[in-house]
């Protein structure tokens, strides 16, 4: 990961007011402090300068020092506070182009570091426009162009885990233009480093190019930007040339760059840059198999990081230490390092997620591997995990699942319910399948009224790619209306043998009637009901439910339920969305439900955003049944329900379903005629996100669009069982699906329906 550089802090223009000379002096002190890597001192100086500018009623000085403060906050690792501060500013209202552009540049840099590339690009393009063809702002213009090139380059890296041609080409062209025209030697060197990373020369020229860039950096006065340039050059060499770990000249050059960065950072007193250099050097030794040296350097970096507000560095260093200790067979210290990494990571994610709904790091790259690697350590394949390690693994998986939903919702804090399993349902068992690269591990939590749930685990030799292959095959079979049930049963039996067969004796002994699955990875695409033991489907023997994590399952409703239902849906195609075909049986489906309990119905043109919102915010209906097209996706912007006049996206569910006149939430949200996004193995997270946004205890939804007639029959039978016969929701769904099976409906028509959340 390349290190961010900061725009040059603003030095406010001179003014004759008596309090302003001191403000200017403090402002310049802040500039000097930040250049030396002393961000805390810079922040204090700028905060004092801001107060003096405020006393003098100088808006430009105030905004300039606030922009500077945001840079210091970002440097200290306080991303949320930095973004909060920038969001309060309105530099576009000022006439000073330099101030406007500087504010936009700071925002662009911060947003890029948070991987909000589209927003960063928009800010930087506007800043570039403000400064173009203005010789007085030439250096600022060059910095903006460099930041924009960085944004295109990083956007291409993240898009598909490999550079996309268009963004990479834009970045390469920008870097080349900057190299040819830049007047600032540091900007030119930075552009050369990043061009070298994206478009490397032939291997024989690499040492020469490194030497040329290195000589430019050596001539520049020490500053954090220069130190980061050394480190970035070293990382670029490692990223683009695998032989840098075996080629002696490349390895020596890379190590010397990092050593020089550390020496100059120490002389400058820049602890953060010292930490970055030591950590990168430790990573280099790790990759070359020099583990004692790698461990020593990493621990030195961790020690330096103690006391700094730098969770972004601390979690990566502890993660690195955990990997080193794992490789050297130091299992217990490795587990401790991973636990520290997760502590710092949670602190970082809380800081990032608390202020802006669009902030998130790349979950798959930066978060998920830490959890999985720790679980792999806690649960060895030989089954030797201690009870405490098993508990820690279960808690880690719960935390991972919660973090995934947080990442989807772009929300740092979720309402969680620390209710034990036995308090929920003593006849239910929670099953956590965990996909690891080399095996499939399943944790099972059995109710235990006298204490915490009784945890067990077992390991299956199915590798991650094998699990994915089986699930993909089964999904293709089951979503094909013409597929043979025999073929489906044969494929699903492979997963039954891995997930359920080892549990069956204990489930029978404990008289378990409900299985709650906290699914992982590719298994989220799996309709659990279709698992087959060779003679019967799983749902024929057990009530089934899904949960994003057990801590996100709301408790059962304690008050007597008012069975009033709001019914909304589309039976006709909306002229605004002609790509979505009519659903003619929706009208019949809604009418059938209306005969069972009190209802309000909005159909077709009436099912629009305004009328729906007006009904829902009254809180009268604890049951909401929406029969319309929709899609669940791991991308919140692609998760939606179709109304007559709009697509209701995930973000719309807060105003649509949460303003309920202090009501306790929705007991059941039913989403029929919806589907999961094709090829998205995290699409059901979108379904979980809808449930959490809507504050629903339970959600019943279809994973693919099912025949209208079958849907009508299943929904009618479900309400009959739940409302009239007082079965639990999971039991009512099981019996409704069983009716369709007994009528010889293929799995395609009954397996799509899943219950998420509270199953009671």
Image (tube, rainbow, N blue to C red):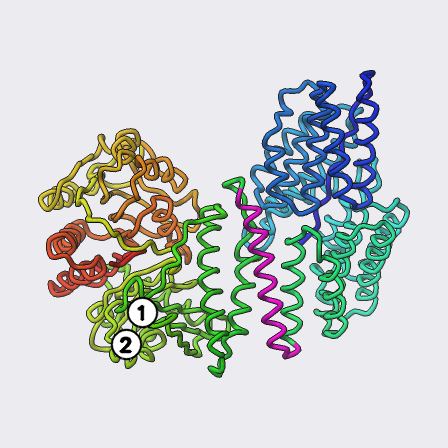
Q: Is residue 551 visible?
A: yes
| Residue 160 is a magenta residue | no
Query: Please, what secondary structure does the residue beneath circle 2 have?
Result: helix
Magenta stretch: helix, strand or loop mostly: helix
| Residue 329 is a magenta residue | yes
Query: Please, what secondary structure does the residue beneath circle 1 have?
Result: strand
On the image, the x and y values in percent for residue 290 come to: 75, 74
On the image, the x and y values in percent for residue 479 come to: 28, 59
Is residue 264 left or right of 695 when viewed as pictured? Answer: right
**Residue farthest to the top, as pictured:** 16
Picture quadrant of residue 434: bottom left
Question: Observer-nearest residue: 265 or 423?
Answer: 423
Question: Observer-nearest residue: 305 or 247?
Answer: 305
Compared to residue 711, the image places residue 188 above or below, namely above
**Which segment is the magenta one?**
328-354
Is residue 727 left or right of 8 when viewed as pictured? Answer: left
Which residue in the structure is indicated by mark 1?
429
Picture quadrant of residue 181: top right
Which residue in the structure is indicated by mark 2?
507
């Amino acid at each position: 990961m390349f290190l961010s550089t900061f725009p040059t802090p603003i030095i406010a223009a001179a003014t004759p007011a008596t309090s302003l000379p001191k403000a200017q002096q403090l402002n310049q002190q802040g500039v000097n402090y930040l250049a030396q890597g002393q961000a805390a001192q810079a922040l204090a100086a700028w905060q004092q300068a801001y107060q003096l500018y405020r006393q003098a009623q100088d808006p430009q000085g105030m905004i300039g020092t606030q922009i500077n403060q945001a840079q210091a906050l970002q440097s200290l690792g306080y991303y949320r506070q930095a973004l909060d501060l920038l969001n309060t500013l309105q530099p576009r209202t000022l006439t000073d182009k330099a101030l406007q552009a500087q504010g936009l540049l700071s925002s662009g840099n911060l947003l890029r570091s948070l991987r909000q590339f589209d927003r960063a690009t928009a800010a930087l393009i506007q800043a570039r426009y403000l400064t173009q063809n203005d010789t007085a702002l030439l250096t600022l213009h060059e910095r903006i162009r460099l930041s924009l090139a960085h944004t295109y380059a990083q956007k291409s890296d993240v898009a598909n885990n490999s550079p996309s041609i268009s963004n990479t080409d834009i970045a390469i062209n920008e870097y080349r233009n900057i190299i040819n025209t830049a007047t600032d030697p540091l900007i030119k060197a930075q552009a050369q480093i990043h061009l070298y990373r994206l478009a490397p020369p032939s291997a024989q020229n690499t040492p020469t190019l490194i030497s040329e860039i290195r000589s430019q950096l050596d001539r520049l006065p020490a500053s954090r930007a220069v130190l980061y340039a050394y480190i970035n050059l070293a990382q670029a060499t490692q990223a683009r040339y695998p032989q840098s770990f075996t080629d002696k000249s490349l390895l020596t050059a890379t190590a010397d760059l990092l050593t020089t960065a550390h020496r100059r950072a120490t002389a400058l007193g820049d602890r953060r840059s010292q930490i970055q250099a030591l950590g990168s050097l430790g990573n280099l030794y790790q990759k070359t198999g020099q583990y004692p040296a790698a461990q020593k350097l990493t621990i030195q970096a961790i020690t330096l990081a103690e006391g700094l507000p730098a969770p972004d560095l601390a979690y990566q260093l502890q993660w690195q230490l955990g990997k080193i200790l794992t490789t050297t067979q130091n299992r217990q210290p490795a587990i401790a390092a991973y636990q520290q990494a997760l502590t710092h990571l949670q602190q970082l994610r809380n800081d990032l997620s608390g202020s802006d709904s669009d902030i998130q790091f790349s979950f798959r790259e930066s978060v998920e591997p830490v959890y999985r690697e720790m679980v792999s350590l806690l649960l060895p394949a030989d089954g030797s995990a201690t009870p405490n390690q098993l508990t820690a693994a279960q808690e880690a998986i719960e935390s991972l699942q919660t973090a995934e939903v947080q990442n989807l919702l772009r929300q740092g804090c979720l309402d969680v319910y620390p209710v034990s399993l036995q308090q929920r349902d003593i006849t239910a068992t929670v099953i956590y399948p965990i996909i690891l690269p080399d095996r499939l591990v399943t944790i099972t939590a059995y109710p235990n009224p006298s204490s915490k749930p009784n945890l067990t685990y077992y390991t299956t030799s199915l590798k991650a790619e094998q699990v994915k292959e089986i699930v993909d095959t089964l999904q293709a079979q089951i979503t094909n209306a013409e597929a043979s049930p025999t073929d489906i049963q044969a494929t699903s039996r492979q997963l039954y043998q891995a997930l359920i067969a080892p549990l069956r004796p204990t489930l029978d002994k404990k008289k378990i009637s409900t299985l709650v699955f906290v699914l992982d990875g590719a298994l989220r695409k799996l309709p659990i009901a279709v698992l087959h033991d060779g003679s019967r489907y799983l749902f024929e023997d057990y009530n089934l439910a899904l949960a994003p994590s057990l801590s996100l399952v709301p408790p059962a409703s304690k008050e007597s339920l008012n069975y009033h239902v709001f019914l909304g849906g589309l039976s006709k195609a909306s002229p605004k969305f002609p790509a979505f075909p009519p659903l003619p049986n929706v009208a019949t489906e809604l009418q059938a439900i209306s005969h069972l309990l009190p209802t309000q119905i909005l159909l077709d043109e009436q099912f629009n955003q305004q009328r729906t919102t007006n009904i829902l915010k009254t809180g009268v209906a604890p049951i909401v049944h929406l029969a319309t097209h929709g899609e669940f996706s791991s991308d919140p912007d692609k998760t939606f329900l179709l109304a007559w006049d709009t697509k209701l996206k995930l973000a719309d569910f807060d105003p649509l379903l949460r303003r309920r006149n202090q009501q306790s939430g929705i007991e059941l949200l039913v989403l029929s005629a919806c589907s999961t996004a094709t090829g998205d193995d995290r699409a059901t997270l979108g379904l979980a996100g809808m449930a959490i946004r809507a504050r629903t205890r339970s959600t019943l939804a279809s994973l693919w669009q099912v025949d209208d007639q079958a849907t009508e029959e299943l929904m009618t039978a479900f309400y009959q069982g739940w409302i009239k016969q007082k079965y639990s929701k999971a039991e009512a769904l099981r019996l409704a699906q069983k009716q369709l099976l007994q009528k010889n409906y293929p799995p395609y028509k009954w397996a799509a329906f899943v219950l998420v959340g509270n199953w009671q």
